Image: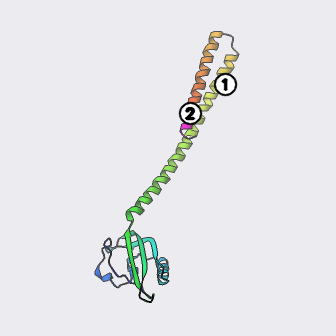
Amino acid sequence: TEIYTLSLHDALPISEDIIGDSIYRLYPEGREKNREGWKERLLRGEDVRVQTKQVKSDGKVMDVQLSMAPLCADKGTITGIVGISHDITREVEAERNLKKAYKDLKKLDEMKGEFLQNVSHELRTPLTTLINTTSVLRENISDEKLKEVLELNEKNLWRLNKLVGDLLDAGGI
């Protein structure tokens, strides 16, 4: 059994010579397995709705949403098919672009995470050293004026440490 096209589609400018010819002429080579599956389903009386590629009259290939259904005679005998294809090239391209943008965004997010981890380490390590050193000096020094200066330094170092922590938390670490 051969499946034939019965009509032309406005979105697919094709010449008159396709009428009555095999519908497979509209689809790129290399899709025989898919086409045979469609044919089997149609011959069983099932509707077929697939996303595939279609060859335009100028030879260019476009992405389409293809819907086909068997055309039956009075006693349920399949006499042909009726089908419509909708050009979804823009939608497929948009989806491809979205997937790429999502992949790029994930990569940037990973890079941001690595950057913030490095910043965290590079800022917190010296701050911790300064805080600890200032605290030890303050506790072991007898000059009251110097103790006040060291206490003020220690408070400011703790404030700076908290600010770094808040910035890193806001950045997602």
- Whole-percent x and y of residue 27? 40, 76
Q: Quadrant of residue 61?
A: bottom left
Q: Is residue 130 left or right of residue 54?
A: right
Query: Mark 1 — residue?
Result: 132
Instruction: Based on the picture, tell me whether residue 83 belongs to the magenta stretch.
Output: no
Q: Is residue 67 left or right of residue 160?
A: left
Query: Mark 2 — residue?
Result: 166
Q: Which residues are magenta?
A: 167-171
- Whole-percent x and y of residue 124? 60, 32
Instruction: Give above or below for 23 relative to 149.
Output: below
Residue depicted at x 40% and y 82%: 81
Q: Quadrant of residue 135?
A: top right
Q: Which comes before the other along the chain, label 2 or label 1?
A: 1
Instruction: Give above or below for 138 relative to 167.
Output: above
Badge 1 amino acid: Asn
Residue depicted at x 45% and y 73%: 49
Q: Is residue 2 left or right of residue 118?
A: left
